[in-house]
Amino acid sequence: QVELVESGGGLAQPGGSLRLSCEASGNVFRAYFLGWYRQAPGKEREMVAVKGIGDSPIYAESVKGRFTLSRSADKNKVYLQMDVLKPEDTAVYYCTGGAHIYDEYWGQGTQVTVSS
């Protein structure tokens, strides 16, 4: 079992930036993948960015060039730097992890709102 705890959500204006953080604990051997999903009101959850140990990050096309995922040296923390934010980025963002799939484990979510 893996526990994921997010922080860093909040309000940003269009063109602004936010940085999300997530720390994994418990059986961290089952956190080969760590990353982020999001769910906007009335829409399905979608993958935003995920990174496996030793792999390059994978990004949704909608965030490429604007969001950057990084992972700590101890492999247990993952960050999402969000730049050039757009109103359509507004969603609840969830930290996810897994041993063989991206989203076996989920955090509680953190709200990101982009509005002027």
Image (spheres, helix red, strand yellow):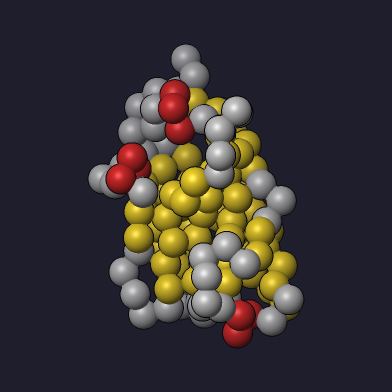
Left or right? Give the position of 30 relative to 1: left
Identify the residue at image location x=44%, y=49%.
48
Identify the residue at image location x=71%, y=51%.
108
Name the spot of residue 112 as percent of width and height, x first. 56, 35
Position of 29 relative to 36 (above/below) = below
Name the spot of residue 50 as percent of width and height, x first. 44, 61
Q: Nearer the viewer, residue 46 or 74?
A: 46
Left or right? Give the position of 33 relative to 82: right
Location of residue 14 (image quadrant): top left
Q: Nearer the viewer, residue 35 or 8?
A: 35
Q: Is residue 3 visible?
A: yes
Name the spot of residue 36 as percent of width and height, x first. 51, 54
Name the spot of residue 89 as percent of width and height, x first. 45, 33
Identify the residue at image location x=47%, y=15%.
116
Position of 110 relative to 104 (above/below) = above
**Quadrant the N terminus occupies:** bottom right
Position of 1 relative to 109 (above/below) = below
Q: Is residue 12 visible?
A: no
Position of 27 relative to 2 (above/below) = below
| Residue farthest to the bottom, as pictured | 29
| Residue farthest to the left, as pictured | 65
